[in-house]
Amino acid sequence: MVTNMSNSVSSRVLVDRYTDIVGPSNEMLGPVKDGGHIEFITVPGCWGAMITPSLRSGHEVSLPVRVEGAKIGDSVALHIETIEQLSEATSSGTSSGWDGRFISDPFIAAICPTCRDAGRHFLYPDTYLDGIGESAVRCKACDSEVIPFHMVEGYTMAFDGEKGIGITVNSDRAKEIARDGRRVMGIHDHAHQHPVVTLAKADLVGTVARCRISVGNLGSIPAIDIPSSHNCGDFGAFLIGAEHEFALTEEQLEQRTDVHMDIDSVRVGSILIVPSKVDGAGIYAGDVHAMIGDGELAVHTTDVAARVVVRVEVIKGLKLDGPILLPPIEDLPFLARPFSHDEISRAKVLAHANATSLEGPVLPIQILGSGPFINAAAENAVERAARLLHLSTDEVKNRGTISGALEIGRLPGYVQLNLLVPVGKIESLGILHLVEAQYGKPSGW
């Protein structure tokens, strides 16, 4: 069910309907009041959508929710309170596009070549499943195999009851899971995707992995319609000059909100601050992962269905290009962590000995950036930080080198720029109360 589909403001909105495109054309649910909660029942993100040609994105995400009081030029803080995994098993692996079965981008514009050759409608074909394996995805109009992706090397993973450990299973078990895929993966009845476990892949067997659940796609809708998997600067770069209907210019891509992050620190206890580029912001979620290593080397990881609960807080007048993340303190790199009393005391002694005054208290923030490759993503993060904090890009680079860090969120181009920022600058953004709630009030300075 979806609660509160009227115009009355609710303290809690439940969302279990889905879309592949995010932007101004979306139906927005809610509104939810400032300080209220949104509960998302999400469906798996990448591979399920990737093997479902009627979906025009590499993700199937929730419909967005309007936030009361959020206007263009504001921001919304998302306090992540709950992420509960619903899937008992999943599948993933490396991928390649299947030549002849898509236009420009297999994530977005899948086709049925048989229907095209016969002069029938061939773009975004409706499909059904016939058996298991890559040949199972069939065009409803002509029964041809139409899966637009090949899983080059893949695995099927089962989870323990506590969702704390996963193991990759053998071929026989993978086939058993494949035959009950929708239930095992916890795919909601309103979702359109085929369960990826249908592929029954078992190239990697007996590998143990720790679960650390996080949300790969969480935040606000862009100011222009974008396939949800491409609401970021790396995958979004493939839209520039594309031959399909979602082609964008470089200038249009700047209207993205960059909330397809794939960062493992977007987890319970984090605070994510996202831009409002349309009135109401339009908060949506999807692409939850049982675990994801920094860089996401395989491009895809363990997508699962989940229950995600966030509390929303409008930050008036904070105009952002992309997100700011306040992860749990244990997720911060060593150099970017708040200083202890002992460290500050030693710094004061050192400053006195060198006839120098300390600049004052500092606290950490992460400014996120993206681009078609890692260096471009790093430059994007640096430029965003410079504009936001009214610093030169050279100062940002120096601070990030000696009292911060640049982390790779995802290849080919998503990064986390960690900076220790003077408290006065954080206060001017209107988010000091959030940073202090996360990391404590600085003292001893």
Image (spheres, helix red, strand yellow):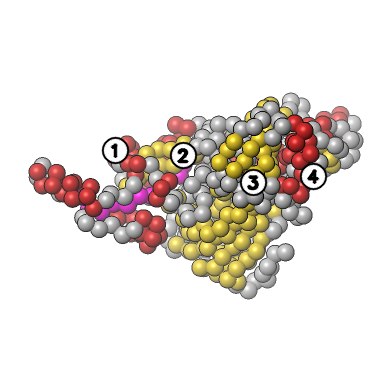
Q: Which residue is mark 4?
A: 180
Q: Which residue is mark 3?
A: 160
**Distance from the alpha carbon under mark 1 to that under mark 3:** 42 Å
Residue 322 lies left or right of residue 224; in this view the side is left
Q: Are marks 1 and 3 in contact (CB under 8 Å)?
A: no
Characterize the local packing of mark 1: few (<14), some (14-19) or many (20 or more) Cα atoms within 10 angstroms: few
Q: Earlier in the sequence, mark 3 or mark 2?
A: 3
> Label 3's element?
loop
The span picked out in magenta is 358-369
Callout 1 amino acid: Ile
Residue 231 lies left or right of residue 195; in this view the side is left
Callout 3 amino acid: Asp
Instruction: Please tell me whether the stretch drawn in magenta is mainly helix, strand or loop.
Output: strand
Task: Reply yes or no: does residue 363 show up in magenta.
Answer: yes
Callout 4 amino acid: Asp
Residue 131 lies left or right of residue 38; in this view the side is right
Q: Which residue is mark 2?
A: 415
Q: Nearer the viewer, residue 166 or 287?
A: 166
Q: Which residue is mark 1?
A: 402
Characterize the local packing of mark 4: few (<14), some (14-19) or many (20 or more) Cα atoms within 10 angstroms: few
Callout 2 amino acid: Val
**Distance from the alpha carbon under mark 3 to that under mark 2:** 32 Å
Q: Are marks 2 and 1 in contact (CB under 8 Å)?
A: no
Q: Earlier in the sequence, mark 2 or mark 1?
A: 1
Judged by depth in the image, the label closer to the viewer, 1 or 3, is 3
